[in-house]
Amino acid sequence: MFVGLSAKPETKDLCQTTNTGKVIAAIEDRIAAGIGIYRTNAVKCAPLDKSGKLRYPTDTEMLACLPYLRKEIDDVAPRVIVPLGGQVSRFLLQHMGDGRPFSGFSPDFSYDTYSLSFGRAMPIHHPSYIWIYKRKRVDEYVARVGDQLMALTNA
């Protein structure tokens, strides 16, 4: 289960037309057939500023949507949850984790796993960060994330 921050106004749930969605699709392609993938967001609506532009959701908005995310997790029962980026990672670990705080990301795309009340989480760099700031390393990122997810799901 990939968990993004929020949807864009014209899209939903990490669609493949966004740069983030395209990178996630590449990770999915790397993962062995037969492993189901579910995409969702921590915030179920697109938070907009006064001018109608997408903005980061507040903690209050994230908390308001938490029961819906928990229900999705219960319904889907994922083997691994993959929070995308630091904001979602910190939030999920704070509200569903075992008390171990989020330690950040390694520059070599080696990702830590965390225990959650319902399973495991592997927070990763947000794909849009990789797309914008590490574009030359997208293939390396996709390979590392895909391989680590395969190892987790087969463990």
Image (tube, helix red, strand yellow):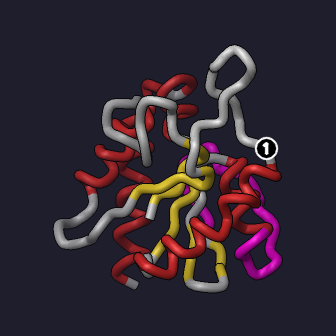
Q: Which residue shows up at 29% across the image and 54% down it?
A: 28
The image quarter in which residue 123 lies: bottom right
Residue 53 magenta-drawn?
Answer: no
Quarter occupied by the N terminus: bottom left
Q: Which residue shows up at 47% across the image and 73% down it?
A: 80
- Relative side of 44 to 131, left or right: right
Q: Position of residue 82 (x, y in %)?
A: 52, 61
Number of marks: 1
Q: Nearer the viewer, residue 73 or 123?
A: 73
Q: Amino acid at mark 1?
A: Thr
Q: Position of residue 57 (x, y in %)?
A: 72, 41
Q: Which residue shows up at 58% across the image and 66% down it?
A: 69
Q: Which residue is mark 1?
A: 58
- Give the residue at the far top of this rendering: 51
User: Which secondary structure type mostly characterizes the magenta part of the structure?
Assistant: loop
Q: Which residues are magenta?
A: 95-112
Q: Position of residue 101 (x, y in %)?
A: 81, 67
- Relative side of 105 to 90, left or right: left
Residue 107 magenta-drawn?
Answer: yes
- Assess disc 1: are there few (<14), some (14-19) or many (≥20) residues with their C-alpha within 10 Å of its C-alpha: few
Asked whether residue 130 appears in the rendered view, the answer is: yes
Q: Position of residue 46 (x, y in %)?
A: 58, 37
Quarter occupied by the C terminus: bottom left
Secondary structure category for the residue under label 1? loop
Asked whether residue 125 appears in the rendered view, the answer is: no
Q: Which residue shows up at 32% across the image and 31% down it?
A: 17
The image quarter in which residue 150 lies: bottom left
